[in-house]
């Protein structure tokens, strides 16, 4: 068979998978609808007075038990079907898409979970965009997008929902097969990030020769933390013991991204917590109130002159003086936000300078100013994606040479490994692996050059700059290396992924 014939067969297979998936989604929708009808029938039968002792609640429970017995499933599973089917009455567009097979049950669950408690008038405003996102995004990314839509549409509702969320915190233990068990915890985003950071710190206390795989190390680190240890016993034979009884605790570092307006209380745009997604502005400010923090501030410039870096920046000397002598002015006086010279620590790309400030003391933020409102990104981003989906030929890389618009390589561009600052900026921008649908956190991804870096001739290949780096998990990085997938950076931080069959996928940065 010719190569063209093989491609046509594979394209046909993918089309069949789409048809089968939509049929399965529609079948799930019919199953839930019929469950609802059966439940309503059993709970209203005789309700007109044929039996004065008729108990509607018990009849409903019996109906659920009857369905569970018939389908050899659990009472809990059928209860969830009933709950979802009734809740969907508030979401007509979601229900229609579900019935048409356009979105699966898993995404319906995600939609209902993330909109729980939101005012009806708010969900009505964003339901159409939620359905659009559900057909485009993977489940985890969909949840993050819904959170962002809610925060942008009704920032004040966050204050009402935080109390409900705090009351829902819990730790559960479930029995698993083969003598195993599962421990799960429902925490706030900041608390979960803190737990993750603690585990990562503990894992880092063993030497590189430890024989355990990453997941085994994380489990043992989790148990060591619960037991009060500050280091993990190494199993390579080096003799390093755990730090039981030591009161010293590791520093916890959380990575957040937001606008300065939000940090200063002048705006209500949501922030972004690395490894989690969108968080409300007040939670972000609460974190800044309680912890020493450090900012990375981006500043767009037209060009960068490697021979005279200061020439490309305004008021560099004034900024450097404030940066070293009086750093609170960096966040309190907007008229003095100016880029720093290279001595301050920066990453560059296409006229953008990213400045890393000195650490700031807890509480160095303004209280919220209620006059300022959020500006929605979602409409803009959906428009961008719709444009590329409608006409993929528009998807041209912004910097096809991998030089980010520079005529001369900026500092660090000709070294293979990015600086710590540049790596942090890339991970914060991307949030997760940039392959469509992948939810591996950026912290667990590798940094990949979009245009290959040529070690023999660095100036001729792609440079190590923000505009030529993105996050890929190990699996998708291997697929790129094997040339099954290719990736390009478009305008607005959009990654365009294509495969050998000519399929196109687009992913957005976690935060711009």
Image: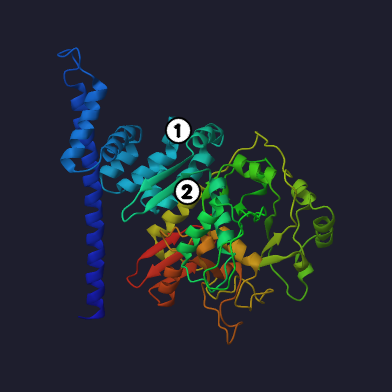
Location of mark 2 (residue):
144
**Disc sitting over residue 117 in the figure:** 1
In the rendered image, the vertical position of residue 299 relative to residue 304, given as above or below: above
Q: Sort mark 2 into few (<14), some (14-19) or many (20+) by Cα contacts within 10 Å.
A: some
Residue 511 shows in the view: no
> Dot 1 lies on which element?
loop
Residue 253, position as x, y percentages in the image: 63, 55
Residue at 46 percent of width and 67 percent of height? 213
174 vs 353, left or right, is left
Distance from Cα at disc 1 to Cα at disc 2: 16 Å
Nearer the observer, 163 or 438: 163
> Dot 2 lies on which element?
helix
Q: Sort mark 1 into few (<14), some (14-19) or many (20+) by Cα contacts within 10 Å.
A: some
Of pointers 1 and 2, the one earlier in the residue sequence: 1
Nearer the observer, 290 or 423: 290
Image quarter where the N terminus lies is: bottom left
225 vs 73, left or right, is right
Image quarter where the C terminus lies is: bottom right
Residue 251, position as x, y percentages in the image: 66, 55
Residue at 45 percent of width and 69 percent of height? 474
**Disc sitting over residue 333 in the figure:** none
Residue 473, position as x, y percentages in the image: 46, 66
Residue 158 shows in the view: yes
Mark count: 2
342 vs 13, left or right, is right
**Tags 1 and 2 touching, CB below 8 Å:** no
In the rendered image, the vertical position of residue 507 relative to residue 4, given as above or below: above
Residue 76, position as x, y percentages in the image: 29, 38
Residue at 50 percent of width and 37 percent of height? 165
């Amino acid at each position: 068979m010719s190569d063209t014939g093989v491609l046509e067969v594979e394209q046909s297979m993918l089309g069949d998978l789409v048809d089968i998936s939509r049929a399965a989604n529609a079948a799930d929708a019919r199953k839930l609808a019929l469950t609802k009808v059966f439940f309503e029938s059993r709970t209203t039968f005789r309700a007109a007075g044929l039996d004065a002792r008729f108990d509607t609640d018990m009849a409903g429970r019996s109906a659920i038990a009857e369905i569970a017995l018939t389908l050899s499933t659990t009472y809990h599973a059928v209860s969830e079907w009933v709950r979802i089917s009734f809740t969907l009455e508030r979401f007509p567009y979601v229900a229609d898409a579900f019935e048409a097979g356009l979105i699966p049950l898993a995404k319906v669950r995600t939609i209902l979970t993330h909109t729980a408690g939101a005012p009806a008038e708010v969900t009505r405003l964003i339901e159409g965009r939620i359905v659009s996102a559900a057909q485009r995004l993977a489940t985890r990314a969909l949840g993050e997008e819904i959170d962002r839509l809610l925060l942008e549409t009704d920032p004040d509702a966050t204050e009402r929902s935080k109390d409900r969320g705090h009351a829902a915190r819990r730790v559960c233990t479930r029995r698993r097969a083969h003598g195993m068990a599962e421990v799960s915890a429902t925490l706030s985003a900041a608390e979960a990030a803190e737990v993750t950071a603690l585990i990562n710190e503990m894992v880092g206390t063993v030497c590189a020769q430890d024989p355990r795989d990453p997941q085994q190390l994380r489990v043992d680190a989790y148990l060591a933390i619960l037991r009060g240890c500050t280091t993990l016993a190494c199993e390579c034979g080096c003799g390093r013991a755990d730090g039981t009884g030591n009161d010293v605790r590791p520093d916890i570092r959380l990575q957040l991204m937001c606008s300065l307006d939000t940090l200063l209380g002048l705006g209500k745009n949501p922030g972004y917590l690395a490894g989690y997604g969108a968080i409300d502005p007040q939670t972000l400010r609460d974190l800044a109130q309680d912890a020493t923090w450090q900012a990375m501030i981006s500043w767009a410039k037209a060009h960068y002159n490697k021979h005279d870096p200061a020439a490309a920046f305004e008021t560099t000397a004034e900024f450097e003086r404030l940066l070293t002598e009086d750093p609170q002015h960096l966040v309190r006086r907007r008229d003095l936000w100016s880029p720093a010279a290279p001595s301050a620590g920066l990453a560059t790309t296409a006229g953008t300078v990213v400045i890393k400030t000195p650490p700031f003391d807890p509480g160095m933020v303004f209280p919220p100013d209620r006059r300022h409102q959020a500006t929605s990104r979602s409409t803009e981003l959906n428009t961008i994606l719709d444009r590329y989906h409608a006409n993929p030929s528009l998807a041209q890389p912004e910097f096809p040479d991998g030089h980010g618009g520079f005529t001369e390589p900026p500092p660090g561009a000709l070294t293979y490994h990015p600086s710590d600052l540049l790596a942090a900026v890339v991970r914060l921008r991307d949030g997760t692996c940039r392959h469509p649908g992948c939810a591996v956190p950026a912290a667990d991804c590798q940094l990949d050059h979009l245009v290959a870096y040529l070690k023999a001739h660095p100036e001729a290949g792609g440079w190590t700059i923000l505009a030529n780096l993105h996050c890929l998990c190990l699996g998708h990085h291997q697929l790129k290396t094997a040339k099954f997938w290719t990736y390009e950076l478009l305008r607005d931080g959009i990654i365009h992924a294509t495969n050998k069959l000519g399929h196109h996928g687009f992913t957005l940065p976690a935060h711009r």
